[in-house]
Image: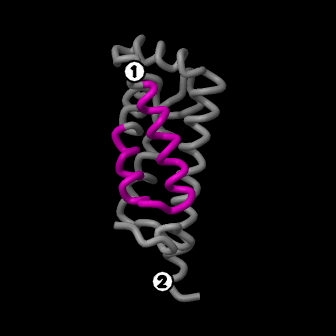
Amino acid sequence: MSDNNQAQYGTFLMRVALGIVMLMHSLYLKMVVFTLAGTASFFGSIGLPEFLAYVVFAVEAVAGIALIVGFKSKYFALALVPILLGATWVHWPNGWLFTAENGGWEYPLFLTFAAVTVYFTGNGAFAIDDKVKTA
């Protein structure tokens, strides 16, 4: 296997892993565990407009799907960066470890770097963009 193939497969794994995490973070955590109304209330409690919870939910879900299938991965990964930086900001007072009460900032910061990595590296292998010509 050539170095280029290895890089393409590594990029694919990072892209899909990030996509799965974001999709599950949106659909399961925000919709099932906390509910969308609960998530909106939390946003309000930290001084953010409650409607942003619905925007974040939608961006995480759509970006997650796009990353999993490899559709415009660079742009969807970039769209996640402000959301992930926001999550890092929210968890900052809780300390470093994500196992801290209310979660620390290590995990959202790592996801931020994963999104930036996908932005810089692109789709990698097995991307739908390779199969479909887009304008």
Whether residue 129 is in magenta: the answer is no
Colour theme: one colour
Residue lying furthest bottom: 2
Whether residue 62 is in magenta: the answer is yes
Taking 106 as reference, is 81 left or right? left
Highlighted magenta segment, given as a residue range: 53-82
Tag 1: residue type?
Answer: Phe
Residue receiving disc 2: 4
- The image position of residue 94, as x and y in percent, is 47, 24
- The image position of residue 18, as x and y in percent, is 53, 52
Q: Label 1: few (<14), some or many (≥20) within 10 Å?
A: some
- Tell me the residue at 44%/39% (across/down): 59
- The image position of residue 131, as x and y in percent, is 51, 74
Which label was assigned to residue 51?
Answer: 1
Which image quadrant: the C terminus?
Answer: bottom left
Marks 2,1: beta carbons within 8 A: no
Which image quadrant: the N terminus?
Answer: bottom right
Taking 36 as reference, is 76 left or right? left
* First reached walking from the N terminus: tag 2 or tag 1: 2
- Tell me the residue at 49%/32% (across/down): 57
User: At numbered mark 2, what does the secondary structure look like: helix, strand or loop?
Assistant: helix
Q: Label 2: few (<14), some or many (≥20) within 10 Å?
A: few
User: At numbered mark 1, what does the secondary structure look like: helix, strand or loop?
Assistant: helix
